[in-house]
Image: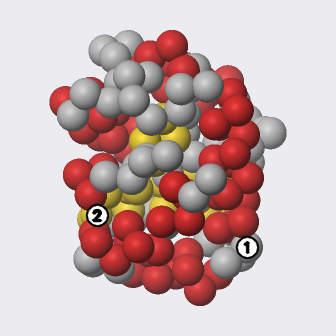
Amino acid sequence: MKVLDEALIQLDVDAATADEAILHMADTLYRLGYVKEDYAKRVLTREKEYPTGLIGQGLGIAIPHTDPECVIKPAVCVLIPKEPVKFMMMGTKDEPVMAEIILPLVVKDSRMQINMLKKIMELLKDTEKLDKIRECKDKKEILRMLAFLEEE
């Protein structure tokens, strides 16, 4: 299933907080027709209740997402902030993760969400690929590195 789009890869994003990073990507998703108007509010609310920060092999990432009701078409975004952004660790509300890669998931159903999360968990184990994604300035190359997300 097609979930990657070069327009949804945002490099060197100026976001000082998790909220700013989420709002930046939500605005892009809304403008490009991926999500409904209430998407940003729902992601922000969900992130406070169920944080999405994770630690890969020494690299912090975050996978903000929300319910499928506000999704028009599925996508996986890539946001690389200029400086790491503080998210809270998944399963906690007070343990910070400095996210260097933010991968907002835009999914239409729970089965797809589970499959995407499994694939992202595999990515978390691949230090070399995570480092390359973080350092890459070529959006097409990032698409190639994440092509496995579109495999069935």
- Residue at the image point whose x is 56% and y is 65% from the top: 148
- Residue at the image point whose x is 28% and y is 64% from the top: 11
Q: Which residue is mark 2?
A: 11
Q: Secondary structure at mark 2?
A: strand
Q: Which residue is mark 1?
A: 125
Residue 23 relative to residue 150: left or right = left
In the depicted structure, whether residue 25 falls above or below residue 9: above
The colour scheme used here is secondary structure
Total labels drawn: 2
**38 or 123: which is nearer to us?**
123
**38 or 22: which is nearer to us?**
38
In the depicted structure, whether residue 33 falls above or below residue 104: above
**2 or 101: which is nearer to us?**
2
Residues at badges 2 and 1 in contact (C-beta under 8 Å)? no
Q: Residue furthest bottom?
A: 128
Residue 3 marker: none
Q: Amino acid at mark 1?
A: Lys
- Residue at the image point whose x is 73% and y is 52% from the top: 118
Q: Position of residue 54 (x, y in %)?
A: 69, 55
